[in-house]
Amino acid sequence: MSIKDKLDTNNIPEHVAIIMDGNGRWAKQQGHVRLFGHTTGVESVREALKAATEVKVKYLTLYAFSTENWNRPKEEVDGLMDLLVTTIANEIESLNENDVRLDAIGNLSDLPENCQAELKRAIERTSKNKGTCLVLALNYSSKFEMKTAIKEIAQKYKNGEIELDDITDHLVSDHLYTAGIPDPELMIRTSGEVRISNFLLWQLAYSELHFTPTFWPDFKQEDFYQAIYEYQNRERRFGLVSEQLNDTE
Ligand code: IPE
Ligand code: IPE
Ligand code: MG
């Protein structure tokens, strides 16, 4: 029996975000170079996406490359960019078959030209799909995202377009890359690291966090369902006390 069958279909998170971590350590464990871990990790992306579409998660955000990751050895960075380009190109057909829409967040204009072009093409070619939206976080930094939002809002205030009181949670959210996307109810990080690594700092304010020791290349559909199962068995209190949540009157 799959854990999927134990899920409450009325309580599926709308948005699940994943920090796909542990490719390098997984590869090393197998006696391979780090890049082999990244290549194998693509299969786990398919697994997570398949699971998300099966249970009708509306948004699946995958942290694929952070702004800090540019500082890795050149051959790894080049390998990751090549992998990104070929994977996006190869997957368009399958995304369309599964009604998946592709989107991306991050400082995309600083990605290599061919990567930007491939991404743009895939986003356009899947734009009419109505199923799960797969959001790739590429050259992403949450601090940069927030800094940019602060600058834009400050500029609008300076221009007299908004008053101080117009600066609400909603307005801030609208100035982030994720504008229009609900905050993730669930964030998963693989590989045993227990940190956020500059990912969605604003958006994760009230997310349930799920940390698993599994390295990303070993992550399968069942692991995704397991995370949702555990999420469904948590009590999200949002600052209230338990009795208030269970008070049905
Ligand atoms: C995650 O795996 C993928 C990226 C950051 C691009 P890592 O490459 O960070 O693998 P570890 O954490 O070194 O094992
Ligand atoms: C976070 O993983 C970034 C991605 C998964 C793309 P890292 O491996 O870069 O994070 P740290 O260095 O362990 O914090
Ligand atoms: Mg890592």
Image (cartoon, rainbow, N blue to C red):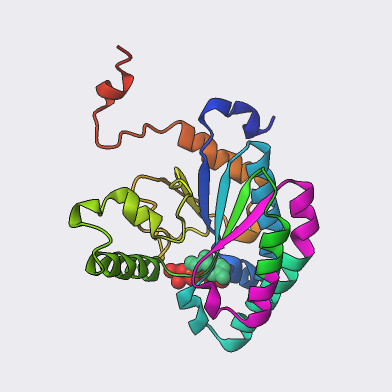
Q: Nearer the viewer, residue 153 or 56?
A: 153
Query: Which residue is farthest top?
Result: 249
In the image, which residues are magenta?
90-118
Residue 35 appears in view: no
Query: Which residue is farthest front?
Result: 160
| Residue 6 in the figure: left or right of residue 99 | left
Q: Which of the 4 image quarters holds residue 108?
A: bottom right
| Residue 12 in the figure: left or right of residue 150 | right
Query: Which residue is farthest bottom?
Result: 74
Could you tell me which residue is drawn at 36 percent across and 34 percent down? 236
Q: Nearer the viewer, residue 108 or 158?
A: 158
> Residue 192, how many percent across, how many down?
48, 58
Image: 97 above or below 232: below
In the picture, the quarter occupied by the N terminus is top right
> Residue 153, how many percent across, how many down?
30, 64
Image: 185 above or below 194: above
Residue 225 appears in view: yes
| Residue 206 in the figure: left or right of residue 57 | left
Please tell me whether residue 151 belongs to the stretch shown in magenta: no
Could you tell me which residue is drawn at 61 percent across and 53 percent down? 134
